[in-house]
Image: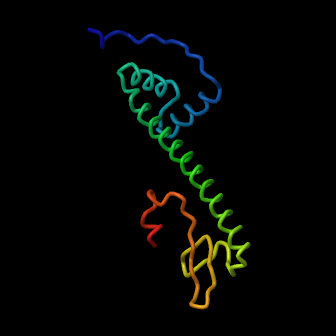
Amino acid sequence: MEYLQKHRTVGISMHPDLEKRAKAQATSLGLKFSPYVTLCIEAEMRGMVNILNKATEKGNSAIAYAQNYMENKSTSEDLCSSIEFVLRELKVDYTRNIHIDSLLADFGINTSSGLIALECCPHIHTHYSLALG
């Protein structure tokens, strides 16, 4: 009968930062440090480490999304700079980053017929509704 065996005490070594985080997590769960570490090890031994893997996958997905966003933002800013250069060369009356009611547009172009809002969107296939708007 395995469950009747007495548990053996073992020592573990961990980085001070990891120990600090583990102690904080244990406290937040209302546990003492040693039982918390034991539960973590038991969970890992039972194959429950997949919870951590899913969190890592979400984290990696979030990082990939952020990288993609920053690349797109960079492309958008490059496009805005190019458009601004053309507007200046053509001596068009414009305002950069204009607020129209509660909306923000990259450019507001003043015409005799009124104001035209211009949004720089280099990837219209991913922002189709924005491009149409």
* For residue 91, above or below residue 14: below
Nearer-the-camera pick, 74 or 89: 89
- Quadrant in the rendering for residue 14: top right
* For residue 57, above or below residue 129: above
Please give the name of the residue rendered at 58% of the width and 84% of the height, measured from the top-left corner.
115
Relative to 101, 95 lies left or right: right
Relative to 95, 21 lies left or right: left
Q: Position of residue 123 (x, y in %)?
A: 50, 57
- Quadrant in the rendering for residue 82: bottom right
Please give the name of the residue rendered at 41% of the width and 12% of the height, measured from the top-left corner.
7
Which of the colour schemes (rainbow, by chain, secondary structure, one colour) is used? rainbow
Please give the name of the residue rendered at 64% of the width and 72% of the height, measured from the top-left corner.
97
Q: How many marks do you count on the picture?
A: 0
Please give the name of the residue rendered at 29% of the width and 10% of the height, measured from the top-left corner.
2
Q: Position of residue 8 (x, y in %)?
A: 45, 10
Relative to 104, 6 lies left or right: left
Q: What residue occupies the far left of the structure in this picture?
A: 1
Relative to 72, 41 lies left or right: left
Q: What residue occupies the far front of the structure in this picture?
A: 90
Q: Position of residue 26 (x, y in %)?
A: 51, 34
Nearer-the-camera pick, 114 or 90: 90
* For residue 52, above or below residue 100: above
